Amino acid sequence: MPKLSAPARRALEHAGYTRLSQFCDVTEAELLTLHGMGPTAVAALRAALEENGLSFAG
């Protein structure tokens, strides 16, 4: 997982996201609905996914 702000980390943990590969099943728009997630956190996740040959759903 990339380095994220505390609110973003809490939002993801609360939603049950613990592994980078889990984000392949969710869209960026869905992540943005989580309280604490914003464009910066989503961009960091997108970059981490791309570095590992993965991408968001959709």
Image (cartoon, rainbow, N blue to C red):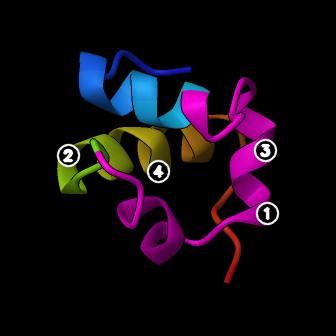
Mark number, residue 49:
none
Q: Secondary structure at mark 1?
A: helix
> Pointer 1 and pointer 3: residues touching (CB < 8 Å)?
yes
Measuring 66% from the left and 59% from the top, which residue is drawn there? 55
Question: What residue is disc 2 on?
Answer: 40
Q: Which residue in the protein does label 1 denote? A: 25
For this view, does 13 lie left or right of residue 2?
right
**Mark 2 or 1, nearer chain start:** 1
Q: Residue at x 68, y 34 (%)?
A: 17
Foreground label between 3 and 4:
3
Q: Is residue 8 above or below residue 22?
A: above
Mark 2 to mark 4: distance in Å?
10 Å
Residue 46: assigned label: 4
Task: Give coordinates of residue 13: x percent, y percent.
Answer: 58, 25
Point out the stretch of residues depicted in magenta. Answer: 14-35
Q: CA distance from mark 2 to mark 1?
A: 20 Å
